[in-house]
Image (cartoon, grey):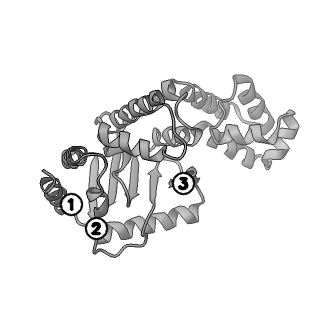
Amino acid sequence: MRLGLRLRRLRERAGMVGDAAAARLGWSAAKVSRIETARTFPSVGDVEDLLTLYGAAPGVRQEVFGLYRDAGRRRWYDEYRGVLAAPALELLDREAEADRAWEWESQVIPALLRTHDYARLVMKGMHAIEPVAETTVARRLEALKARQEYLLDGSRPFTFTAVVHASALRRPLGDARVLRDQLRHLVEMSRSEQVRLRVLAEESPHPMTAGQFVHLRFPDLPAVVYLEEILGTRLVSDAGQVRGYERAFDHLCAVALDEADSRLLIRDIAGARR
């Protein structure tokens, strides 16, 4: 992601649009776009050609090839590429660079806080229209577990703040044990130094009646938002729209229960499901 963004900035600094750069190199415009948005990993020759075209100075070339080496390193999710859709891989790629994530969920528990059994039922529900093989579901569950461990095992500077509507805590999935175990897991995860969990009570006013979004912040890159829609995940990178989601999340936090009261409510709901 950082490599693509740096190459885009060099192109813009050189006063070129993507189509012009592609034409100069005999490429398709789509190739330049895919490199800049990290959908395609360029070859060394591709990077060399771009840097030459943009007139990059020696120091800049050294920096870019450093980014190239970093981008080529194996990611935790590489072994799951065969079972994850392209938008999901893009989210994981950006998430790996983030130092903070905010998530709003009105229907279900956030993925980073799900138990195996709860996550499996959510996946089965998502695939009800277009079923997938059980082996694919199993591999996606492995990927989720690896994602949770990578982000929340305390080994990297990453914090996760979630606001969850209280109705999601009561929505039954499977038998009572699945939801009860999930709620107990939420209580446990809410004590982590990396997790800030807030519950929006049913009677609280809020700006959205449905939906989900994830806001990612980076140490030295612009923030982005991901929306979960019926047809898949959609990226929002426009600065004005991203600020709108930030204001919405600030409002959700302002009207939600604090962390301590949220934990008590989750415990109460879990206790009622014995």
Position in image of residue 161 (x %, y %): 33, 54
Q: Secondary structure at mark 2?
A: loop
- Residue 139 quadrant: top left
Amino acid at circle 1: Ser
Pick the front one: 228 or 59: 228
Checking the image for residue 230, the label placed there is 3
Can residue 101 be seen here? The reply is yes
Pick the front one: 75 or 127: 127
In the picture, measured across the screen, residue 60 lies left or right of residue 169, that is right
Checking the image for residue 262, the label placed there is 1
Amino acid at circle 2: Ala
The answer to whether mark 1 and mark 2 are in CB contact below 8 A is yes
Checking the image for residue 256, the label placed there is 2
> Dot 3 surroundings within 10 Å: few (below 14), some, or many (20 or more)?
few
In the picture, measured across the screen, residue 61 lies left or right of residue 106, that is right
Of pointers 3 and 2, the one earlier in the residue sequence: 3
Position in image of residue 243 (x %, y %): 50, 65
Residue beneath the point at 19% across and 45% down: 188
**Separation of disc 3 and disc 2 at Cα?**
26 Å
Q: Secondary structure at mark 3?
A: loop
Of pointers 1 and 2, the one earlier in the residue sequence: 2
